[in-house]
Amino acid sequence: MKSISLLHPFSAKAIGLSERDIFFSHSKPHEKALLKLQKEGYEVSIDYFTGSLLPFTKKIGDIKKRFWPITKPLIKKRHGWRKQHSLFHYWNSFFNAPDLTIINMSGHGSLYCFKLAKMLLKKQKSYITMIGGIHVSEDLSGKEYYENAHHIIVHTEVQKKQLLQKEIFKNLNIQVMPLGIDTAVFTPKKKTSNTLELLFVGRISRLKQIELCLKTLAFLIKNQDKEVSLTIVGPISDEIYFGELKALAEHLKITERIKFVGSIEQKELVPYYQNANLLLLPSAHESFGMVMVEAMACGTPVAALLGSGGPDEIIENSLNGILVSKENYAENILNYFKDKEIEVRLSKNAREMAVQKWSLSQTENALRNSVNQVFR
């Protein structure tokens, strides 16, 4: 039986999440695609780093998630992004290397990724690099890491195109694995509220530019007559930024119109998407943005920023969502709500496109194709 490990070489805290988020919410499309391979006869596992002192395994549904203690840095910057090493994981891979390791990391990689990849090659085991984002390491270690990979996985055609423009990727095998969702779970529901319900789903982090959501809410309250509310769902990754958002809400006099929900499991997101009139995604950069296709599958269009990456591939402005500049963001959303016919049309198109392009079967087929290339 061939074995496959999907390695996320970082702890939950390093990406602003809790281990509970890792247990139940993180990387669900990958998890479900691996489950499909498991049913087809492969031995699969998902690996993370942890701040715990000893390794442990958590079985979530039918998938095995393994957690390996961080051994470097020990105290200072222990949960620093791209700083983490785990001798527990390294030596387990040395003595029990899976037949295929899929390493999911930002394009900059990490010293641990580079070290692990060299060891796997010496043991004649294959690895695939899975890249989130378009910013990459172009030093010698990073170059060798990508060149020696069996192939590279990204999640959008936009990401692939941007990477191929960089010198170190020009002649490399880059393949797209779209992150799909279960469109039988994420389904539309008739909206009954007369309130315009705005929704943000994601980490409360400065990179997400959530202040634009608050300013958009204030703009809508001022410039149209309907009641408007904003629900923010997601873990707090930056307490200072969270405090700034609350202060901004008070300054704009919209505190009572905003609800902070915190982190919830993926399956609990469905009613939030179904009840929302619009998902706000004002991030400066999104490599893919799972929340986009989840919302669209529920018939809820998305308002994102032009040039932010993943949204440029997924959203077609005025066809299945709103894709505009930061400067015109609030004004375009106001115009959207002024025309009920546009709202109905975009909702219908969003659902249809999610089903056609981003169903879970797309992820399963792409991952199976990657694995078959390694083992053929």
Image (spheres, rainbow, N blue to C red):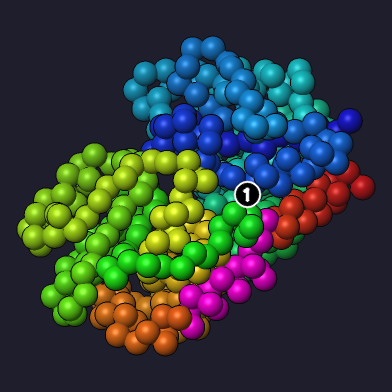
Identify the amino acid type marked 1: Pro
Observer-nearest residue: 170 or 349?
Answer: 349
Residue at the far right: name it. Answer: 376
Residue at (71, 47) in percent of width and height:
33
For label 1, the crowd category at 10 Å Cα-Cα, with few meaning under 14, some 14 to 19 and many 20 or more, is many
Q: Secondary structure at mark 1?
A: helix
**Is residue 348 found inside the magenta-colored segment of the image?**
yes
Residue at the far top: name it. Answer: 54
Give the main secondary structure of the magenta stretch. Answer: helix
Residue picked out by circle 1 = 29
Residue at (15, 55) in percent of width and height:
256
Q: In this image, 70 relative to 352: left or right? A: left
| Position of residue 310 measured from the top left corner of the image (x, y, whole percent) | 51, 65
Does residue 147 lie above or below 176 as drawn? above
Residue at (92, 47) in percent of width and height:
376
**Is residue 104 found inside the magenta-colored segment of the image?**
no
Q: Is residue 247 visible?
A: yes
Observer-nearest residue: 165 or 224?
Answer: 224
Chain part drawn in magenta: 345-360
Does residue 271 lie above or below 192 as drawn? above
| Position of residue 154 measured from the top left corner of the image (x, y, whole percent) | 63, 57
Where is residue 211, by image quadrant?
bottom left
Observer-nearest residue: 50 or 92?
Answer: 50
Does residue 98 lie above or below 292 as drawn? above
The N terminus - image quarter: top right
Q: Is residue 145 visible?
A: no
Where is residue 240, by image quadrant?
top left
